Structures are given as C-alpha cells and as structure tokens.
Amino acid sequence: MPETIVIKSDVERNAEWRDAFKDYDINVCFWNRVADKRLVDYALVWKPEPGSLRQFSNLKIIFSIGAGIDHLKGSDIVPPGIPVVRMVETSLTAGMVEYVCYHALRFHRFMPQYERYQREQQWRTIMPVPASARTIGILGLGVLGSAVAQALKPFGFRIAGWSRTAKRVGGVESYYGDSQLNAFLGQTDILVCLLPLTEQTRYILNAENLSKLPRGACLINAGRGRHQVQSDLIGLLDNGRLGGAALDVFEDEPLPQHDPLWSHPKISITPHVASMTTPSCGAQHVRDNITRFRLGKPLAHLANMERGY
Ligand code: NDP
Ligand code: OXD
C-alpha cells in the first residue's frame, strides 16, 4: 500500500500541491480531510497548531513548507523524535535573490529619493556612488544569503557576510560570531537580514547594533519581523542615522492597520512575499527526501531544532 503525505498549506494551493505529487508513489491528503490518521507517514506543513501533529501516530518526517522553521518551535508542535526538514528549493532561492537585488539596487541608485523628487516635480541630481565604493553586508550566509551574495557580486559591490561559523563563499568577506559583528556592521552601507529567528538572533536589528552602521546606511529585512525592534528603526530613520528600510517581515503579521510603519516615508513595505515556495519545486525537494528516507540515506536539509534552524 502506498504511503501517505498530509499537506497543510493555503487551501488555494492544494490543487497545485496535488499535481506536484501526481507522478510519485504516494497518497496525498489535505489537513482536516484525513480519512485514517494512522495511515499518515509524512506531513508537509506551514504553521500547524500546537498539538495538531500528534494526531498522526505513525508520522515519520515533518517537512516545513518554508525555509524558516520558527513556526514549528514552541511546546507541543513537533512530537518528540520526529525529524524536521526545512524547505530548500530553486524557486524560493530565486525569489529571494530577486527581492534583495531589487531593493539593494534601488537604495544604491537613490531611487526612494528620486521618487520623492518626482512627486515634488523637482529636477535634482544626486551624485552617483560607484558600486565598488559600497559594501553590502548580509546577516546570515546560508542557502539564501550565499545565493544573494553571488547575485550581487557582478555589479561590483564589496560583499560581506556574517554567520555563526566561518564561510568560504567566493568573493565574499566572511565575518562570524558575536565578536566580529561590530566590525561587520561598521563597514556595511546596505544591510540585508537573512537570518533565521532564534533566541540568539531575536531583535538583533536594534538601536545599538543599527547605530554601528555608517550614517545613512539602508536596511533590507527579509528574515523575520522579530529580528527588528520596530520603534528603534523608526527613531533611527527619523534622526537620519538610517537612510531607508525595505521590510518584508513584521513582528505582527498582517501588519496592524494603524502601525506607524505603513506611512513612514523612508520605509518600503511588502506583505511577507520576498519569496515563496512553489509547489512543483517544493514537492521535488520533498520527494527526493522521501526517496532518500526509503533507501535508508540521510535526509537533506534536516533542521536542528535545538539550534533553531
Ligand atoms: P540557512 O539555515 O541556510 O542559513 C542561516 C544562516 O544564518 C547561516 O549562515 C547561519 O550560520 C546564520 N546564523 C544562524 N544563527 C546565527 C547566529 N546566532 N549568529 C550568526 N549567524 C547565524 O537558512 P536560509 O538561508 O535558507 O533561510 C534564512 C531565513 O530566511 C529563514 O530562516 C527565514 O526566516 C527567512 N526567509 C524569509 C522569506 C520571506 O519571504 N521573507 C522566505 C524564505 C526564508 P551558520 O551557517 O554558520 O550556522
Ligand atoms: C519561509 C518564508 O521561511 O516564506 O520560507 O518565510
């Protein structure tokens, strides 16, 4: 009898997910529509309720629909002993590369200022800065951070990355650990956050750290909303310490109607869409891992739940 995977995604994408598994030897069923819970072997989920995965007593692997696994942290979400695999797939990476490159180039070429001049019907020139005179610093040099670094390199920027452990990514200066954070921030003109949300990284984008950036530096946060202290950010933008911010993620999502971030003139907002898993590519990653599991091979992109990513 074929194995079964249960999927908890946005319902509008169910048909796409079903299609993406159709040539694979597996039954697909959807959340709240499982006939026999004991027959579920795998779960592919985004934000399951605490206790809800416990209903599948024979679960073998939990797959996160997203790259981040912070939605699976917290008591009684992942039943003890069940491995968690994070999402790593080509279209998710490509989407993040597009989002970050777009905003980095937008800040580099003073587009927020030119958009304001246009609204004010002002014909004004800002002297260009060559890419070679700008440093883009990426917090988190993992799957997404490294891909972004490689994509930005050909423009001629100086690229630096900060991670927990030292990295060798071609043409990227590696900074690592808490002791090198200040040196990394001190020379970063455009700061990109692609960290996972963990106890160590929570509120890392606070006034103390952001004040170490050169005056007028810009921030792109596509990691998680709880990386940034929103009131600190507004203060630094208002007093000119920061030149602008592109934010895709927020402490509370959806961003509340009356949040001051919505109307801040130096902030550009997107509703957590920097990148998204595409069912066809995401299913390929899940299928490859299930095949590895069936053959007794180690799983790829296994999350370390203790470490938090
Ligand atoms: P990875 O696990 O591949 O990379 C994480 C990176 O962060 C690693 O380089 C790791 O260092 C570094 N890191 C973790 N903790 C610390 C720390 N305490 N100090 C310094 N560095 C640290 O993750 P991905 O690149 O795949 O994804 C990153 C995040 O992007 C996700 O967790 C998610 O929050 C976010 N995301 C947002 C999306 C959006 O649409 N806004 C879409 C997809 C992802 P090391 O390698 O040395 O351990
Ligand atoms: C993710 C996300 O983690 O979309 O993949 O936020």
Image (spheres, grey):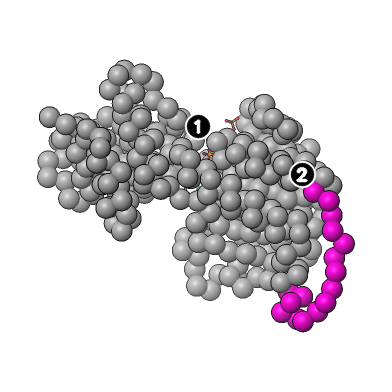
Q: Residue furthest bottom?
A: 121
Q: Residues within 10 Å of mark 1 (few under 14, many from 20)?
A: few
Q: Please tell me which of labels 1 and 2 falls first in the chain.
A: 2
Q: Position of residue 70 (x, y in %)?
A: 45, 43
Q: Is residue 294 above or below residue 251?
A: above
Q: Which residues are magenta?
A: 116-131
Whether disc 2's CB lies below 8 Å from ligand 1 is answered: no
Is residue 208 left or right of 230 when viewed as pictured? right
Ligand 1 is located in which of the four quadrants?
top right
| Numbered disc 1: secondary structure | loop
The answer for how far apart the CA atoms under marks 1 and 2 are is: 32 Å
Nearer the observer: mark 1 or 2; the answer is 2
Residue that carries the numbered disc 1 in the rendered image: 307
Asked whether the residues under the numbered discs 1 and 2 touch, taking CB atoms below 8 Å apart as contact, a structural biologist would say no
Closest to the observer, 216 or 16: 16
Q: Is mark 1 within 8 Å of ligand 1?
A: yes
Q: What secondary structure is the magenta-colored segment mainly?
A: loop
* Front in this rendered view, residue 131 or 293: 131
Residue kind at label 2, given as amino acid type: Phe
Q: Is residue 125 magenta?
A: yes
Is 134 in front, or is 61? Answer: 134
Graded by Cα atoms within 10 Å as few (under 14), some (14 to 19) or many (20 or more), the crowding at tag 2 reads some
Would residue 24 appear left or right of 283 to someone viewing this image? left
Q: Amino acid at mark 1?
A: Arg
Residue farthest toward the right in the current orientation of the protein = 127
Task: Identify the mark at residue 157; answer none if there is no mark.
Answer: 2
Residue 252 is at least partly visible in this image: no
Q: Tell me if residue 71 comes above or below residue 289 in the rendering.
A: below
